Every structure is written in structure tokens, then in C-alpha cells.
Image (cartoon, helix red, strand yellow):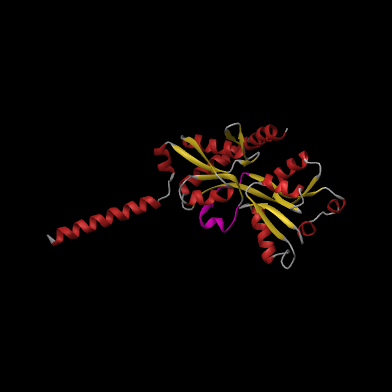
Amino acid sequence: MFLKKIRVVILILLIVSFSGCKKNNIRDLKDIIERGKITVVTNAVFPPFEYYKFNNIEGIDIDIAREVAKDIGVELEILEMNFDGVIAAIASGKGDFVAAGLTRDPKKEKAISFSDDYILVPQSLILINNKINNKINNEIDALKDKKIGVQIGTTSDKYIRDNIKNGFLKNSLSELVEKKEYLDLVIDLRNNRLDVIALDGFIAREIVKRNKDLIYFDRDSENYALAVKKGNDDLLKKINQTIKRLLDQDKIKEFYKKHYDYKFK
């Protein structure tokens, strides 16, 4: 009887242990195929990479995500949220991969693995078009002792934050202002609540094109990549195969032209 109870306890412990492991398991490529669906996480306020077209989410990243789903042979599900939540969504298993204009960040690589790069994007600063700002041609003059607007969770956010803490803006009067949406930054800049905005160069060009009272210049450039939960190596390999195929076929250039022309021409 005593041995029987021990066996029952061991069996219960094993069940709990296995169910706990299952809960924490990565939804790998085999699981995705069996499920018949792959979930991409994005933030649809970043044209031409992701944006709403009527009630549908479209963009360069979404077209790439569709190609990933097609190559795996499953349906694509799109999960949209604020940009500062996309990494946590993957880490917690709510989604399978991120397509949201991501750039590499060693801190993020503790939770996710990045795919191969698929596009090089300039990083820019936007200022009010006036005599003083027209003479500025470097980021030190543009950012030092200024109120700087960034979108939360972006590389520009990290870049400005790091430089205020320990970089060329340390001991200056520079102040970081974070917003969830870049359009809110533009409103604040035009209403003198900000001195400068740091953001993606493609977006900067279109903002300036539509607002003649603004100017921009590029401070740097960076590559974009997709991302999966750390350890989901089979899915990452499949995504990289899709990216390579799309680059070899010049498809990403086609995606860029299609969505850039729709949103900005």
C-alpha cells in the first residue's frame, strides 16, 4: 500500500512537471505546422513597414511575414499592439515572431533571437525649419541641451537614453521625452513642446515632405530584422531561408516600392 502511494505521488509529480514544461515550451516549427497557423506580432503605425489600410494591416514587414507563412505552409495571424510590448509578447508565447522594424540590441537578445537583416534604414533627426536650425549639420548641435522626442522602445529611444546617461549628452541639459506614437511627437515639435525628434529616416522624409515648416538630416543608418523567441532555432532557420529567397529575388525592393508608393505618393 505504501509503495502504491509512492507510485501515485511520483506519477502526480511527473504530470505536474511535464505540464509545467509544456507551458514554458517554445511553440516551435513542428507545433506551428500542426496548428496550421503562425502568429506575427507588429505595431501598425509605422508606414511603409506596417500600417492600417482600411481595416487591414499591410506593409513591407507584413508582406515578408506572409511569405514566411507561405513557405511553412500555414495561415498567417497578425497580432497588433504597442511597439514597447512586441518583445514581451514573443517572450511570453503570445506570438511566434516579430515583424515591426526591429534593429539588433544585445539587451533584447536575452529574450529573442534576430533573423538575418533584410533592409538598411537611415536614422534621422527632425527639427523646426528656421534660420538657427538650418545651420545645424551634426547631431551634437542638434541634440545638446535640447528636449528630444522619441518613440518608446525604438533604437532611437535607446540611443538618446544611453548618450544622456554616459555619452556625448552627459552633463548637458538634454531631456528625453517618450511617446507611444511618432505622430504625437510631430504635434509636440510643431507646438514647441520639443526641440527635435529622433526616428526612422523613411518616416522622417515623409513627415518633412508634408510639413514644410520642418527639416531633417540623417545621423546614422541601421538594419532591420525579424525576431523569434530565444531558442526557437528551427523557426529562425526557416525565416532566414525566406529572407534569403526574397532578397535573391529582389522581392523586398518590390514590397518597399508598393507600400511606399501607396502611403506616400
Q: What range of the chain is rendered magenta? A: 104-118
Q: Residue furthest left?
A: 1
Residue 48: x, y in percent? 65, 38
State the predominant SS element of the stretch in magenta: loop
Q: Residue at x 43, y 46 (%)?
A: 28
Residue 103 x, y percent position in the rendering: 61, 50
Where does residue 66 sit, x and y in percent of width and height? 54, 35
Query: Furthest-bottom residue in view?
Result: 171
Residue 91: within the magenta? no
User: Within the magenta stretch, is there residue 112?
Assistant: yes
Please tell me how many numbered marks the rendered image carries.
0
Q: Is residue 198 left or right of residue 35?
A: right
Residue 73 horizontal side relative to residue 208, left or right = left
Point 73% across, 57% down: residue: 147
| Image quadrant in which the N terminus is located | bottom left
Could you tell me which residue is drawn at 71 percent across and 60 percent down? Answer: 175
Please, is residue 217 above or below residue 35 in the view?
Answer: below
Taking depth in this image into account, of 213 and 154 the one nearest to the observer is 213
Location of residue 46 by image quarter: top right
The answer to which of 134 and 37 lies nearer the viewer is 134
Locate the C terminus and report the quarter of the image it occupies: top right
Quick check: 140 above or below 229? below
